Image (cartoon, helix red, strand yellow):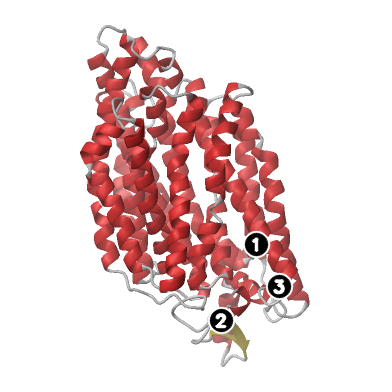
Amino acid sequence: MSLHRNQKSSTLSIENPDDDDDAEETLEEAIVHSGVLQVEAASKVYGRNSRLALFVGLGLAAYIYSLDNQTTSAYLAFAASDFGDHSLISSIQTAQSIILACGKPVIAKLADISSRGTAYVVVLLFHVMGYIIIASAQNIDTVAAGVILFAIGLQLLMQIIIADITTLEWRGLINGLLAIPFIVNSFIGPNIATAVLETVGWRWGYGMFVILVPICLSPLIITIIWAERKAKRLGLSPGKEIPPKSLLERARIMTEELDLLGLVLITACIALILLPLTLTGTVNGGWSNLLMLFFEQASMILLIALGGVLLPICGVWDVCYAKYPNRSVIIVSLIGAFDFCSYFLTAVYLYSFIIVVKPWSLLYATYFSQIQSMALTIFAILAGVIMKYTHRYKALLIIGLFIRLVKDLNFNLLTTARGAKGSDAELIWTQVLQGLGGGFAASCSQVGAQASVPHIDLAMATAVILLVTEIGASIGGSVGGAIWSSKMPRKLAQYLPDLSEKERAALFSSITDVTKYERGTHVREGVILAYSDVMKDLLVLASILSVFPLFLAILLPNWYLGDKQNAVNDEDLSWAN
């Protein structure tokens, strides 16, 4: 037997081999892409009712993902504050971003080698375990472990499945429509989060998703697994044609295809460099105290040095062994990295900032935190409609990135609007602009990158884009955390010199300690000035980083978005139209 790719389609086929080496090579190729083969076979068994069930399942999954995202994002600040470790939020979110990034290729390859349904079950188990751990946590370390676990995979698998079943001209619009729950939950989520925080507490806020997520994901998982098994029973899947391999052999093939050593290297490198940056302000004395602590605990300087040593090793490994994606995937990955780095510089502490500097109730502060998500969804749908009828994406992508750049470069507006003295309208307008540019940019860049790869490379290409993008988020969050942790104590000392160091440390460590003081009091106003100064510094750096995505977008090819699964071969998805 031999396996080869049809150049006119991403469909894989098995034929007689020329020799034993070809047979072994093509067998491994079949194993590597058996999940893709199952998707293509399953697409032939969907009827009207099963197709409806698939999209209803996707809708439920999208809804619970949105509700999860738009409620639990408010709990972390209070969970960290309960343990007296509010400043560690950036460290936790940086660790989450690192695992989220580097876990994506693993989940993508699992979906390619096993099946989409199997990958969804694995991701669901991690999600549920993560929330159980957080809900029962007795310290901030356990919270961090749970946050890291539940982060793996849901977003990626939804994007892969949508790309599996939609043509290019419809993909942006379908992605946008499945984000509609973010609009609905922009109003529902804050009310739920506020009610939870004011009554049963943040633990139940996380805990309720241990039940809700499995219930809402079950219809999608059942439909996908049903279609895969039916295709196999009908002989449409290539299972019988591919001789079975042992579990150990499949693990070896997956490890080689995944470039596991390279993934471990990049994960270790990022973690060793970024996590210590976010912890500098939490060590008593900051950087000046590091040498004294060298023999007492793992020195942050040593960790950063180790990460620095690994950087060139990662580079050499990539040059010699890694399989580079095409130009579109590389450029879109870099656009996402710079964009997320810019965004997360200020986003990590934005919710805390609003609670401290604005005289808003907890409900309205949580409403504010959802404005950008709502705007992102509305304008992503609009972008999808435009791409459906223009069949192009590049101009719209450039427009979206330009709007983000204009918003960030308008430094006076941002620092005024995000400061305590800015009007509510100015503050809200910055979030709407962020959502407008982001909705256009995210929708267009993803469709453009997916257009550039055949179906068998879709999952890994999507994972690579999200990996690099999440690395950008990690860098932004860690640098933002480092700036916040190092400058905030000094700013609090500058504006509140009459307080003791212990009192200032309490204000630094917990927003609930800050909000005990009414607006207009000496302490609250001093904290507001400190928060505003640090946020301005973060905004300057974010504005600089926003320039790069715009220039990168100009280098992208302007693919035609037609009625095909991708723009590089003729694979038809007529059933999805």
Q: Position of residue 60 (x, y in %)?
A: 65, 52
Quick check: 95 above or below 172?
above
The Cα–Cα distance between marks 2 and 1, rounded to whole angstroms, is: 19 Å
User: Does dot 3 land on a helix, a strand or a loop?
Assistant: loop
Q: Which residue does the image show at 52% across and 46% down from the upper left?
A: 183
Amino acid type of disc 3? Tyr
**Quadrant for the C terminus in the image:** bottom right
Q: Residue at x 22, y 40 (%)?
A: 411
Q: Quadrant of residue 192?
A: top right
Q: Amino acid at mark 2?
A: Asp
Looking at the figure, which quarter contains the N terminus?
A: bottom right
- Using residue 136 as the reference point, say whether residue 431 is left or right of it: left
Of the numbered discs 2 and 1, the one sitting upstream in the chain is 1
Viewer-nearest of discs 2 and 1 = 1
- Left or right, 213 with respect to 313, comes to right
- Please provide percent x and percent y for residue 442: 41, 57
Question: Nearest the camera: 81 or 573?
Answer: 573
Question: In what element is the residue under mark 1?
Answer: helix
Circle on res. 343:
none
In primary-sequence order, the first of circles 3 and 2 is 3
Identify residue type, mark 1: Phe
Mark 1 closeness class: few <14, some 14–19, many ≥20 residues within 10 Å: some
Q: Give the labeled residue for mark 1.
A: 55
Q: What residue sits right under mark 2 in the picture?
A: 572
Q: Are marks 2 and 1 in contact (CB under 8 Å)?
A: no
Q: Nearer the viewer, residue 548 or 273?
A: 548
**Dot 3 crowding, Cα within 10 Å, few <14, some 14–19, many 20+:** many
The residue to which callout 3 is attached is 46
- Which residue is located at x 66 percent, y 35 percent? 208
Q: Position of residue 5 (x, y in %)?
A: 53, 84
